[in-house]
Image: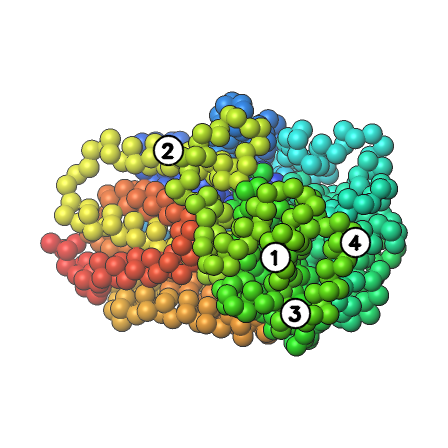
Amino acid sequence: MERKVLAQRVFLVAFACLAGEMVLFRLFAFLFGHHFVSLPVALATLGYGASGTLSPLISERFRRFVFSLFGLSLLASIAVFLFLPLDVYQFFVHPLQWVYLGGLLFVVFFPFFFHGLLQVTAFELFPEFFPSLYALNFVGSALGVGGAFLLLFVLDELRVLFALLVLLIFAGNQGKKRLFALCFLPFLFLPLQPFLSPYAPSRAITALPDTHLLGIYRNPAEYLEVFTSPHARSGLGLSPLFQELPPESFVLIHDHVTTTYFPQRVNSTFLEHLLMSLPFRAFRPDRVLVVEERDGLAVYAAWAAGVRAVDFVTRSSLFSAFLREHVSFFPARVHVGFPRKFIAARRAFWDMVVLRVPVGRATVFPGGFSFEEDFLLTIEGVKNLFQALDVQGIAVFSLFLQNPPSVLPKLVLLLREVLGEEELRERLLVVKSLDLALLLVKKTPWTQDDLESIFSLVREYAFDFVYGPWGEEEMERVFQTGKRYYRAVCTALEGKGSELFDLRPPRDGRPYFGNFLRLSALGEALKEVGKRWLPFGGAGFLVVLFTLAVMGGFSGFFILLPCFLRKHPPSRYRFRFSLGGVLTGAGFMFVEIPLIVYLHMLLGFPLHAFSLLLGVLLLFSGLGSFFVFCRGTAFPRFLFLSHAVVLLGCFLGLFGLRETLLGFSSLGSLCVVLSILALVGWFLGFPFPLLSQSIRHTAPHLFGEVFAWNGFFSVFSSLLAHLVSLFWGLWIALFFAVLAYLAFSLLLYPFFPGEGNKANRS
């Protein structure tokens, strides 16, 4: 194969493969109820690692068809999402679903395998040009990320994959072979959707009679379906004294898995009996900020209570479009933006801020809730909320109640960390209906008028107090709960945790309010398998752990096992180079995964963070690799010594500038972040090309083995980095990355300059 043709195919396959990874990111969001960012990354690195291990077993004749096989594997990935009856809702009652999930992951890993095999082939055919081919691969990958983002504006996820297939066939062939691309053009005009469980909300709602789909809204980061049905009623937090039917509602389904009911019409009687109306009627604020209350009840309740000005902020442009098209009267100024950044940059003051705690019902979905980042419900985020309140302002948190209590005590512990125990006791009120609670915190202690006003309204509408400055006998009188929620609040105020749940207050460095799982409770969760159709709470995390186990099994079978079974010629450099492959694989993943999570705070959507980080890192890593190619063994030693230090400085800058970046405009913060990420990417582009240079000069036969170790630990580390971030924090993961690159620098330091050439001559 000519080097020019090979370079062209390396670029095309890199473009299509990384664009496909972006699509996988969205498809897994539909499947798991969360983006699960480490899974597509792990699949990619599994493919690359397996190609390194298995490449010596693959004949040269077979490798001539790698480009065509990549196209077939892309087609197989489309087919498996279209037709495989994988139903995560039945995961715990039908073991066949375990096989389906393993089969899906098995098929989807092959495009990455053939992408990696093409890179190994390029190294073996043209080792002296590999750094330049490696750089070209990085550039193609970076453009693939951006290309997928643009394609997702005009096509849905599966049709994007068909578009990539058409591009691959047309651009990668000549003459009559290009005509084969015409076979797949019709699929670009079909309304393709991945297989969805009959229990998925977007499928289940169609079983209701007289239900109509009003419209579908989509962009690269969101998918919103809007239905109307006479059976859909919005009645969250209603007083037991309300005797009428709740109003008919629109049904909004986000990414096929999350359901919201938005009332088509509201009346004064309905709004009067809402628990959400209490703070507006009791305290009569003038200016209110409502954050992400996508059922709209807080906005309508504020309007009915006579609030003069209501601001509503949502990060979803699709929800804003729904309001414009289907809601004739919405009594609020709608702002589209990431709420944390909106509050920090607005520098305005409100009398009341209303925030929905977005966990509740998500705890029954198969495990993805634990991975849901939320930068408003962190210590730093809550401080921003209080800074946005006027002197006498009130923060109102609405939340679903669970039994045993989990969300409520975690929220109390978070507020205790922000305000202190004594101040929180003087400022805290908690009231509840049957299924919903409001936690109210005032910026100053409650006055007697405040307490009398809310007390009379709670009793008038038969709601319950959970916590307040009254005696225990006044708590939970209407709904007989054994005062479990009152005791949970009192325990949290004392700073005590729970044996059942992880209630540690989240921080920006560990922004997982929805993670209640204690690792020590996994044994109890295992006992629930098969006993419930949908697992409650921590048991759902077992789907995530099963996925990790499958990926670990695949990586062991495709990477480590062939590596151990092969005969290896002796080499005194084997351990050094293998360890270098391990460190580069682990280091890159321990940078990539936590930074994707962190950038979510600044960019608003996980897909935006994923695409920006991946695109910038790949592009500038490619430039860093090209720099290595130009310098060869004359690579400056001071860059070895400064490598880890520069990375540490970049991480400190990103985290240290957090509040400043939140206060900047979107364009200003993006420019600062891009320049820091560009520097990170450039330095991340050094290690593996330097390793390949050292191998080429000393022991070329070790490249496939080192590539395999790099791939195996990339798979392992991508998943491990996500779990480390989840349970211990982003900073711990980034610290491991700095240690890995520091060890790599010390490991290869003797090879540059000159020692590699001496070893080769000897």
Precedes in sequence: disc 3 or disc 2: 3
Viewport quadrant of the N terminus: top left
Closer to viewer: mark 3 or mark 2: 3
Asked whether disc 3 touches disc 1, contact meaning CB atoms under 8 Å apart, the reply is no
Residue in the image at 84% along x and 60% along y: 304
Visible in this render: residue 42? yes
Precedes in sequence: disc 4 or disc 2: 4
- Give the left or right position of residue 538, taking residue 186 as reference: left
Closer to viewer: mark 1 or mark 2: 1
Above or below 478: residue 597: below
Viewport quadrant of the C terminus: bottom left
The residues bearing labels 4 and 1 have C-alpha atoms spaced at a distance of 19 Å
Report the amino acid beneath label 3.
Trp
According to the image, label 2 marks what residue?
Answer: 553
Q: Quadrant of residue 345?
A: bottom right
Asked whether disc 1 touches disc 2, contact meaning CB atoms under 8 Å apart, the reply is no
Q: Residues within 10 Å of mark 4 (few under 14, many from 20)?
A: few
Precedes in sequence: disc 3 or disc 1: 3
Q: Quadrant of residue 536?
A: top right
Report the amino acid beneath label 1.
Gly
Which element type, helix, strand or loop, lies under badge 1?
A: loop
The residues bearing labels 1 and 2 have C-alpha atoms spaced at a distance of 57 Å
Precedes in sequence: disc 1 or disc 2: 1
Label annotation for residue 460: 4
The residues bearing labels 3 and 1 have C-alpha atoms spaced at a distance of 16 Å
Asked whether disc 4 touches disc 2, contact meaning CB atoms under 8 Å apart, the reply is no
Precedes in sequence: disc 4 or disc 3: 3
Report the amino acid beneath label 2.
Gly
Q: Position of residue 192 (x, y in %)?
A: 69, 35
According to the image, label 3 marks what residue?
Answer: 446
